Amino acid sequence: MPTPQTPAPKSVFARLAEHITQFVGSTLAFCLAVGTVLVWAVTGPLFHYSETWQLVINTGTTIITFLMVFLIQRAQNKDSLVMHLKLNELLAATKGASNRLINAQDFTEHEIQLLHQYFCLLAEKAKADRDLGKTHSVEEAEENHAEKRAAHRV
């Protein structure tokens, strides 16, 4: 298993997909796409705007769009995973942060909803404290709130 210091070599597909993704996001690729459409449009009279002439652009754009959807999704998945890793690192390294949120992207819908309700409760407690500048982890907030309630009872 590769260590964080020695990354695994990229597969041929991974390298190819990265190069294609980089290219299709470039100005040159956009200009080529616009140029292709312009050439197609200019040749319309030459081909008498035939069904075949229309089919060429429809087929070409459909195939390119179909393939691009997968490349875009691959890039999105990678970016999303990297973002989660960075957030996990921040959570793990921040004193007082709740470690229960590390890998929250893997929680079930029910677990996410429970945490959402819990954070809504914390927000309500913060509003009641009238101190919007204070932040706490889930555990610290519960402990802090309990201490405040006990202090007010005395």
Image (cartoon, grey):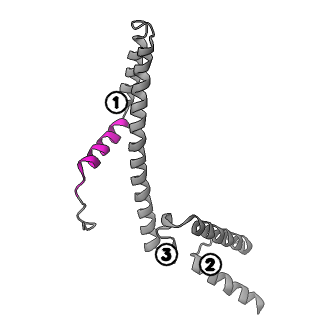
In the image, residue 90 lies at what x, y percent? 45, 68
In the image, residue 88 lies at what x, y percent? 44, 67
Q: Amino acid at mark 1?
A: Leu
In the image, residue 58 lies at what x, y percent? 44, 24
Residue 100, placed above or below residue 147: above
Label 3 and label 2: CA atoms lie apart by: 14 Å
Label 1 and label 2: CA atoms lie apart by: 53 Å
Q: Amino acid at mark 2?
A: Ala
**Magenta segment range?**
9-24
| 63 relative to 99 in the view: left or right | left
Quadrant location of the C terminus in the rendered image: bottom right
Magenta stretch, main secondary structure, is helix
Q: Residues within 10 Å of mark 1 (few under 14, many from 20)?
A: few
Which residue is the extreme one toward the right? 153
Residue 8, placed above or below residue 111: above
* Observer-nearest of 94 and 59: 59
Label 1 and label 3: CA atoms lie apart by: 45 Å
First along the sequence among labels 1 and 2 = 1
Q: Give yes or no for residue 20 being in the magenta stretch.
A: yes
* Observer-nearest of 88 and 134: 88
First along the sequence among labels 1 and 3 = 1
Contact, CB < 8 Å: mark 3 with mark 2? no
Please, what secondary structure does the residue beneath circle 3 have?
helix
Q: Give yes or no for residue 74 being in the magenta stretch.
A: no
